Structure formats: C-alpha cells, structure tokens
Image: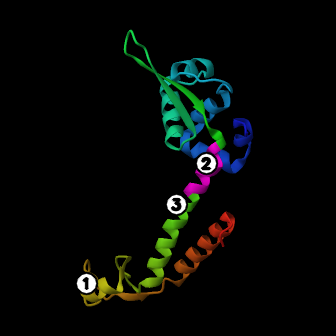
Amino acid sequence: MVSVTELLDDPAINAYILRMIGEEGIELLRRFPEDGEHSDEELAEITGVNLNTVRHTLYTLYERRLAEYRRLKNTETGWLTYLWHLRVDRIYDVLEEQIRDVLEQLDTRLAYEEKNDFYMCRNCSVIYTFTDAANWNFECPNCEEMLEHFDNELLAAALRKRVDRIKESLGSA
C-alpha cells in the first residue's frame, strides 16, 4: 500500500491533490494518523489544522473516493459522529477515471471540429458554424460585417495530438 508521504513526493500527484484541497488540505494529509478512524474534531486537534478546513478537505476527498467514513449514533443524544480514514490507495484509479472523462470530452470536441465548417466575424471575433452563417446570409448578426471562412485545422490537429497522447498514456492507442 502506498503511503501519503510517497504520494505527495510525486510532483504530478502532489499538484493534483494541491489543486483539489489546497495547502492546508495537504498539511492535513501529511499529519493524518496512519492507523484507525478519527472524527473531524480529533483530526483538527491532532493535526493542528482548522476544523472547517478538516471538514472541507474530508468531504472533498470523500467525493473523489479518497476518504471514507463510518457513522456512529449516540443513543442518548442522537448526535452523529463520523469516523474518517483515508483511501489514498485509490488515487491511481481516480486519476485514470478523470483522464478518461477528459479524453471523452476532447474526443467529442474533435468530432465537432472535424464535422463542421466555420465562419468568423473579424470585427467581433465570433466564430459560427456553416449552418448558422448560412442562416444569416454570411453576415454577422451583431455588426452585419461579412463572415469569412475560418480554417480550424490547427485546432483540430492540436486536439488530435492531445487525444493520441492521452490514449497512448492510457495504453489504448
């Protein structure tokens, strides 16, 4: 099993987690006890991280399946206590899933770029599909200037390259 320290020593994973939970969240991870389950209040006390930051970090990690909790109900007061533990061993699966989502979005955008012909208003810097441009008789609906053909091949090529590189990194090229 991979430790939090090992993960945070990887620059790419560190950057990903930093964007997700910020510097204070990283500090919580660094100081998180390695064994057992802990309430958010215990974690704030043990780690010295603000309670609101602890809660925000835990919920963010939970949303990404990188933390789990067990809920206990106090029979006398009815209060619920959440006991948390990390599941950073799932980080690679979470990253792969997000990369696949991005790949799907890029594939969709590439298909759109390849399927359509575009026209641009040089005055407004707005780009329209052929269908929209034809509906407006190739005049900009904003300023009435004539629309000019827009060559999107550079964008399509960049998208193709990015899609190919992601597929290659996933081993599905």
**Is the magenta region chiefly helix, strand or loop?**
helix
Q: Residue furthest front?
A: 75
Residue matched to label 2: 16
- Which kind of residue does numbered mark 3 sit on? Asp
Instruction: Please give the name of the residue rendered at 52% of the width and 34% of the height, measured from the top-left corner.
Output: 57
Q: Left or right: 34 with respect to 129? A: right
- Mark 1–mark 2 distance (CA, rounded to whole Å): 46 Å
Q: Which residue lies under the disc numbered 3?
A: 101
Disc 1 secondary structure class: loop
In this view, the mark in front (3 or 2): 3
Contact? badges 1 and 3 (CB < 8 Å): no
Report the amino acid beneath label 2.
Tyr
Residue in front for this viewpoint, 60 or 143: 60
169 displayed left or right of 116: right
Q: Residues within 10 Å of mark 3 (few under 14, many from 20)?
A: few
Residue 62: give x, y in percent of width and height: 51, 38
- Give the labeled residue for mark 1: 144
Residue type (three-letter) at the residue carrying disc 1: Glu
The label on residue 172 is: none
Magenta span covers which residues? Answer: 90-98
Contact, CB < 8 Å: mark 3 with mark 2? no
Q: Residue at x 53, y 79 (%)?
A: 156
Q: Is residue 168 above or below residue 31?
A: below
Task: Give the quadrant of the N terminus.
Answer: top right
> Is residue 91 covered in magenta?
yes
Give the SS element for disc 3: helix
Q: Which one is nearer the viewer's eye here, 145 or 163? A: 163
The image shows residue 47, relative to residue 108, as above or below, that is above
Disc with the residue nearer the chain's start (3 vs 2): 2
Residue 61's x, y, as percent? Answer: 54, 39
| Residue 73 image offset from top left, x and y in percent | 43, 18
Q: Nearer the viewer, mark 1 or mark 2?
A: 2
